[in-house]
Protein backbone atom coordinates (compact mmCIF):
# COMPACT_ATOMS: atom_id res chain seq x y z
CA UNK A 1 0.00 0.00 0.00
CA UNK A 2 2.99 2.25 0.39
CA UNK A 3 3.19 3.20 -3.29
CA UNK A 4 -0.10 5.11 -3.14
CA UNK A 5 1.39 7.56 -0.62
CA UNK A 6 4.39 8.68 -2.68
CA UNK A 7 2.53 11.42 -4.59
CA UNK A 8 0.89 13.11 -1.63
CA UNK A 9 3.87 12.78 0.73
CA UNK A 10 6.94 13.74 -1.26
CA UNK A 11 5.83 14.94 -4.66
CA UNK A 12 5.97 13.71 -8.22
CA UNK A 13 9.76 14.01 -8.55
CA UNK A 14 10.27 11.63 -5.63
CA UNK A 15 7.75 9.27 -7.17
CA UNK A 16 9.70 9.30 -10.45
CA UNK A 17 12.88 8.45 -8.55
CA UNK A 18 11.06 5.66 -6.72
CA UNK A 19 10.10 3.93 -9.97
CA UNK A 20 13.79 3.46 -10.79
CA UNK A 21 14.36 1.40 -7.64
CA UNK A 22 12.22 -1.45 -8.91
CA UNK A 23 13.58 -3.70 -11.69
CA UNK A 24 11.50 -4.99 -14.57
CA UNK A 25 10.19 -8.49 -13.87
CA UNK A 26 10.26 -11.58 -16.02
CA UNK A 27 7.02 -13.52 -16.50
CA UNK A 28 8.23 -16.16 -14.05
CA UNK A 29 9.19 -13.61 -11.36
CA UNK A 30 5.90 -11.80 -11.81
CA UNK A 31 3.92 -15.02 -11.43
CA UNK A 32 5.84 -16.03 -8.32
CA UNK A 33 5.23 -12.65 -6.65
CA UNK A 34 1.54 -12.67 -7.55
CA UNK A 35 1.08 -16.15 -6.09
CA UNK A 36 3.03 -15.24 -2.95
CA UNK A 37 0.68 -12.31 -2.37
CA UNK A 38 -2.51 -14.18 -3.23
CA UNK A 39 -1.78 -17.40 -1.38
CA UNK A 40 0.29 -16.18 1.57
CA UNK A 41 -0.47 -12.47 1.92
CA UNK A 42 3.21 -11.62 1.38
CA UNK A 43 3.30 -7.80 1.63
CA UNK A 44 6.84 -7.59 0.27
CA UNK A 45 5.79 -9.57 -2.82
CA UNK A 46 2.93 -7.09 -3.34
CA UNK A 47 5.36 -4.17 -3.01
CA UNK A 48 7.71 -5.66 -5.60
CA UNK A 49 4.89 -6.51 -8.00
CA UNK A 50 3.28 -3.07 -7.89
CA UNK A 51 6.58 -1.20 -7.67
CA UNK A 52 7.81 -2.75 -10.91
CA UNK A 53 4.74 -1.31 -12.66
CA UNK A 54 4.91 2.27 -11.39
CA UNK A 55 6.36 3.23 -14.79
CA UNK A 56 3.19 1.94 -16.38
CA UNK A 57 1.10 4.25 -14.18
CA UNK A 58 3.12 7.28 -15.31
CA UNK A 59 2.84 6.26 -18.97
CA UNK A 60 -0.94 5.90 -18.78
CA UNK A 61 -1.37 9.11 -16.75
CA UNK A 62 0.58 11.15 -19.29
CA UNK A 63 -1.83 9.97 -21.97
CA UNK A 64 -4.58 11.89 -20.15
CA UNK A 65 -2.61 15.10 -19.75
CA UNK A 66 -4.87 17.09 -22.09
CA UNK A 67 -7.74 17.45 -19.63
CA UNK A 68 -6.20 20.22 -17.53
CA UNK A 69 -5.75 18.19 -14.34
CA UNK A 70 -2.44 17.93 -12.45
CA UNK A 71 -0.36 14.99 -13.62
CA UNK A 72 0.42 14.18 -9.97
CA UNK A 73 -3.30 13.69 -9.29
CA UNK A 74 -3.67 11.45 -12.33
CA UNK A 75 -0.70 9.35 -11.22
CA UNK A 76 -2.13 9.06 -7.70
CA UNK A 77 -5.43 7.79 -9.08
CA UNK A 78 -3.56 5.43 -11.39
CA UNK A 79 -1.85 4.01 -8.31
CA UNK A 80 -5.26 3.22 -6.85
CA UNK A 81 -6.11 1.30 -10.01
CA UNK A 82 -2.77 -0.51 -9.85
CA UNK A 83 -3.42 -1.67 -6.29
CA UNK A 84 -6.93 -2.82 -7.24
CA UNK A 85 -5.44 -4.83 -10.10
CA UNK A 86 -2.91 -6.45 -7.75
CA UNK A 87 -5.69 -7.45 -5.36
CA UNK A 88 -7.70 -9.16 -8.12
CA UNK A 89 -4.96 -10.53 -10.42
CA UNK A 90 -5.02 -14.28 -11.03
CA UNK A 91 -1.60 -15.45 -12.20
CA UNK A 92 -2.94 -18.92 -13.01
CA UNK A 93 -4.73 -17.56 -16.07
CA UNK A 94 -1.43 -17.04 -17.86
CA UNK A 95 -1.72 -13.31 -18.56
CA UNK A 96 0.99 -10.77 -17.82
CA UNK A 97 0.20 -8.44 -14.94
CA UNK A 98 0.85 -5.31 -17.04
CA UNK A 99 -1.86 -6.34 -19.52
CA UNK A 100 -4.36 -6.81 -16.69
CA UNK A 101 -3.30 -3.75 -14.69
CA UNK A 102 -3.53 -1.43 -17.71
CA UNK A 103 -7.34 -1.64 -17.67
CA UNK A 104 -7.61 -0.93 -13.93
CA UNK A 105 -5.21 2.01 -14.15
CA UNK A 106 -7.04 3.55 -17.11
CA UNK A 107 -10.44 3.03 -15.45
CA UNK A 108 -9.32 4.71 -12.21
CA UNK A 109 -7.88 7.73 -14.05
CA UNK A 110 -10.90 8.09 -16.32
CA UNK A 111 -13.27 7.95 -13.35
CA UNK A 112 -11.22 10.68 -11.63
CA UNK A 113 -11.30 12.89 -14.74
CA UNK A 114 -15.05 12.49 -15.17
CA UNK A 115 -15.68 13.56 -11.57
CA UNK A 116 -13.20 16.44 -11.49
CA UNK A 117 -12.95 17.88 -15.00
CA UNK A 118 -16.13 19.90 -14.48
CA UNK A 119 -18.02 21.16 -11.45
CA UNK A 120 -21.07 19.51 -13.01
CA UNK A 121 -20.80 15.76 -13.41
CA UNK A 122 -20.54 14.71 -17.07
CA UNK A 123 -21.94 11.20 -16.69
CA UNK A 124 -20.47 7.77 -16.01
CA UNK A 125 -22.28 5.26 -18.21
CA UNK A 126 -20.11 3.24 -20.57
CA UNK A 127 -21.43 5.16 -23.60
CA UNK A 128 -20.86 8.56 -21.95
CA UNK A 129 -17.31 7.65 -20.99
CA UNK A 130 -16.59 6.44 -24.51
CA UNK A 131 -17.93 9.66 -26.01
CA UNK A 132 -16.14 11.92 -23.51
CA UNK A 133 -12.72 10.36 -24.05
CA UNK A 134 -12.97 10.09 -27.85
CA UNK A 135 -14.82 13.24 -28.92
CA UNK A 136 -11.76 15.49 -28.86
CA UNK A 137 -9.67 12.95 -30.79
CA UNK A 138 -12.28 12.52 -33.51
CA UNK A 139 -12.82 16.28 -33.80
CA UNK A 140 -9.09 16.65 -34.36
CA UNK A 141 -9.09 14.02 -37.07
CA UNK A 142 -11.98 15.80 -38.79
CA UNK A 143 -10.42 19.26 -38.33
CA UNK A 144 -13.34 20.50 -36.24
CA UNK A 145 -11.42 21.92 -33.28
CA UNK A 146 -12.85 25.45 -33.40
CA UNK A 147 -15.47 26.44 -30.83
CA UNK A 148 -19.15 26.23 -31.70
CA UNK A 149 -21.59 23.59 -32.85
CA UNK A 150 -20.38 20.78 -35.06
CA UNK A 151 -21.59 20.47 -38.62
CA UNK A 152 -24.38 17.91 -39.17
CA UNK A 153 -22.01 15.75 -41.20
CA UNK A 154 -19.44 15.69 -38.37
CA UNK A 155 -22.10 14.90 -35.76
CA UNK A 156 -23.34 11.97 -37.86
CA UNK A 157 -19.81 10.69 -38.46
CA UNK A 158 -18.86 10.82 -34.77
CA UNK A 159 -22.15 9.26 -33.63
CA UNK A 160 -21.69 6.43 -36.14
CA UNK A 161 -18.05 5.88 -35.16
CA UNK A 162 -18.80 5.70 -31.43
CA UNK A 163 -22.25 4.10 -31.74
CA UNK A 164 -23.99 6.78 -29.67
CA UNK A 165 -27.04 9.00 -30.40
CA UNK A 166 -26.34 12.18 -32.36
CA UNK A 167 -28.05 14.21 -29.63
CA UNK A 168 -25.44 13.00 -27.11
CA UNK A 169 -22.63 14.17 -29.41
CA UNK A 170 -24.20 17.63 -29.77
CA UNK A 171 -24.91 18.02 -26.05
CA UNK A 172 -21.47 16.90 -24.87
CA UNK A 173 -19.69 19.06 -27.43
CA UNK A 174 -21.60 22.09 -26.12
CA UNK A 175 -20.73 21.12 -22.54
CA UNK A 176 -17.03 20.86 -23.36
CA UNK A 177 -17.09 24.19 -25.19
CA UNK A 178 -18.75 26.02 -22.30
CA UNK A 179 -17.48 27.01 -18.89
CA UNK A 180 -18.74 26.25 -15.41
CA UNK A 181 -20.55 29.12 -13.72
CA UNK A 182 -20.40 29.89 -10.03
CA UNK A 183 -23.55 29.42 -7.96
CA UNK A 184 -22.72 32.80 -6.40
CA UNK A 185 -23.31 34.58 -9.74
CA UNK A 186 -25.95 37.29 -9.34
CA UNK A 187 -29.06 36.83 -11.48
CA UNK A 188 -30.89 40.06 -10.65
CA UNK A 189 -30.06 43.52 -11.93
CA UNK A 190 -29.67 44.97 -8.44
CA UNK A 191 -27.46 42.11 -7.25
CA UNK A 192 -29.87 41.05 -4.55
CA UNK A 193 -30.15 37.36 -5.51
CA UNK A 194 -27.72 34.68 -6.73
CA UNK A 195 -28.26 31.34 -8.46
CA UNK A 196 -27.71 29.60 -5.12
CA UNK A 197 -30.58 31.50 -3.50
CA UNK A 198 -32.89 30.53 -6.36
CA UNK A 199 -32.37 26.78 -5.96
CA UNK A 200 -35.13 24.74 -4.37
CA UNK A 201 -34.33 22.76 -1.21
CA UNK A 202 -34.83 19.12 -2.24
CA UNK A 203 -33.89 17.63 1.11
CA UNK A 204 -36.55 15.42 2.71
CA UNK A 205 -38.85 17.00 5.28
CA UNK A 206 -38.52 15.86 8.93
CA UNK A 207 -41.73 13.85 8.52
CA UNK A 208 -40.38 12.06 5.45
CA UNK A 209 -37.09 11.32 7.22
CA UNK A 210 -38.91 9.75 10.18
CA UNK A 211 -41.05 7.59 7.86
CA UNK A 212 -38.02 6.49 5.82
CA UNK A 213 -36.12 5.57 8.99
CA UNK A 214 -39.06 3.57 10.30
CA UNK A 215 -39.45 1.67 7.01
CA UNK A 216 -35.73 1.02 6.87
CA UNK A 217 -35.82 -0.42 10.38
CA UNK A 218 -38.82 -2.56 9.47
CA UNK A 219 -37.08 -4.00 6.41
CA UNK A 220 -34.01 -4.78 8.52
CA UNK A 221 -36.10 -6.61 11.15
CA UNK A 222 -37.93 -8.60 8.46
CA UNK A 223 -34.64 -9.62 6.90
CA UNK A 224 -33.15 -10.72 10.24
CA UNK A 225 -36.27 -12.74 11.04
CA UNK A 226 -36.23 -14.37 7.61
CA UNK A 227 -32.52 -15.24 7.88
CA UNK A 228 -33.27 -17.03 11.14
CA UNK A 229 -35.48 -19.48 9.22
CA UNK A 230 -32.50 -20.74 7.20
CA UNK A 231 -30.27 -23.51 8.46
CA UNK A 232 -26.67 -22.70 9.36
CA UNK A 233 -25.20 -23.80 6.02
CA UNK A 234 -27.77 -21.93 3.95
CA UNK A 235 -27.30 -18.81 6.04
CA UNK A 236 -23.52 -18.84 5.76
CA UNK A 237 -23.55 -19.48 2.00
CA UNK A 238 -26.14 -16.77 1.36
CA UNK A 239 -24.22 -14.26 3.45
CA UNK A 240 -20.97 -15.11 1.66
CA UNK A 241 -22.49 -14.96 -1.83
CA UNK A 242 -25.09 -12.18 -1.62
CA UNK A 243 -24.49 -9.91 1.37
CA UNK A 244 -20.72 -9.39 1.55
CA UNK A 245 -18.90 -6.47 -0.05
CA UNK A 246 -16.51 -8.98 -1.63
CA UNK A 247 -18.61 -12.10 -2.37
CA UNK A 248 -16.93 -15.49 -1.97
CA UNK A 249 -16.50 -17.61 -5.09
CA UNK A 250 -18.25 -20.92 -5.62
CA UNK A 251 -14.83 -22.58 -5.59
CA UNK A 252 -13.91 -21.20 -2.16
CA UNK A 253 -17.22 -22.26 -0.65
CA UNK A 254 -17.10 -25.69 -2.29
CA UNK A 255 -13.75 -26.32 -0.60
CA UNK A 256 -15.08 -25.08 2.74
CA UNK A 257 -18.20 -27.27 2.72
CA UNK A 258 -16.60 -30.21 0.84
CA UNK A 259 -19.22 -30.25 -1.92
CA UNK A 260 -19.21 -29.37 -5.62
CA UNK A 261 -19.51 -25.80 -6.91
CA UNK A 262 -22.83 -26.73 -8.55
CA UNK A 263 -24.13 -27.90 -5.17
CA UNK A 264 -23.13 -24.55 -3.61
CA UNK A 265 -24.99 -22.76 -6.40
CA UNK A 266 -28.10 -24.86 -5.76
CA UNK A 267 -27.99 -24.19 -2.00
CA UNK A 268 -27.56 -20.46 -2.64
CA UNK A 269 -30.55 -20.36 -5.02
CA UNK A 270 -32.75 -22.37 -2.64
CA UNK A 271 -31.77 -20.22 0.36
CA UNK A 272 -32.51 -17.03 -1.55
CA UNK A 273 -35.96 -18.31 -2.54
CA UNK A 274 -36.69 -19.25 1.08
CA UNK A 275 -35.53 -15.83 2.22
CA UNK A 276 -37.76 -14.03 -0.29
CA UNK A 277 -40.76 -16.11 0.68
CA UNK A 278 -40.19 -15.56 4.41
CA UNK A 279 -39.83 -11.79 4.00
CA UNK A 280 -42.96 -11.60 1.83
CA UNK A 281 -45.02 -13.68 4.26
CA UNK A 282 -43.85 -11.59 7.21
CA UNK A 283 -44.64 -8.35 5.40
CA UNK A 284 -48.11 -9.50 4.38
CA UNK A 285 -48.86 -10.38 8.00
CA UNK A 286 -48.37 -6.77 9.08
CA UNK A 287 -51.56 -4.69 9.63
CA UNK A 288 -50.41 -1.94 7.28
CA UNK A 289 -49.58 -4.43 4.51
CA UNK A 290 -53.03 -6.06 4.79
CA UNK A 291 -54.66 -2.67 4.58
CA UNK A 292 -52.74 -1.79 1.42
CA UNK A 293 -53.20 -5.15 -0.28
CA UNK A 294 -55.70 -5.20 -3.20
CA UNK A 295 -59.11 -6.66 -2.45
Image (spheres, rainbow, N blue to C red):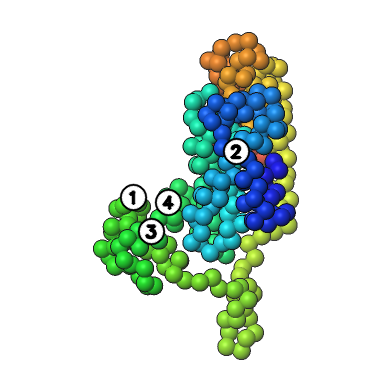
Report helix, strand or loop for mark 2: loop
Q: Residues within 10 Å of mark 1 (few under 14, many from 20)?
A: few
- Mark 1 vs 3, N-terminal side: 3
Nearer to us of marks 1 and 2 is 2
Residue at label 4?
Answer: 130
Nearer to us of marks 2 and 3 is 2
Q: Is 194 left or right of 213, judged from the image as shown?
A: left
Residue at label 1?
Answer: 163
The span from disc 1 to disc 2 (Cα, nearest Å) is 42 Å
The furthest residue to the left:
153
Between 14 and 58, the one nearer to me in the picture: 14
Q: Is residue 235 visible?
A: no
The picture places residue 118, in percent across and down from the top left corner, at: 54, 64
Q: Is 63 left or right of 199, judged from the image as shown?
A: left
- Mark 2 vs 3, N-terminal side: 2
Residue at label 2?
Answer: 23
The picture places residue 115, in percent across and down from the top left corner, at: 56, 57
Report helix, strand or loop for mark 1: loop
Looking at the picture, does residue 99 appear above or below residue 62? above
The image quadrant where one finds the C terminus is: top right
Residue at label 3?
Answer: 137
How many numbered discs, if any?
A: 4
Amino acid sequence: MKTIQFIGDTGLSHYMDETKRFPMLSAEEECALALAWRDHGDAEALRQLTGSHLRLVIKVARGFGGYGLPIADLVAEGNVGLMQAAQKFDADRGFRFATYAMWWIRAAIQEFILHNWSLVKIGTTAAQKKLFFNLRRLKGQMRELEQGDLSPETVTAIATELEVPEADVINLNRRLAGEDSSLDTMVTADGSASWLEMLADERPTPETAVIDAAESGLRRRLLIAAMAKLNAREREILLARRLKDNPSTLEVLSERFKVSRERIRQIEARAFQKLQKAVLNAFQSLPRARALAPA
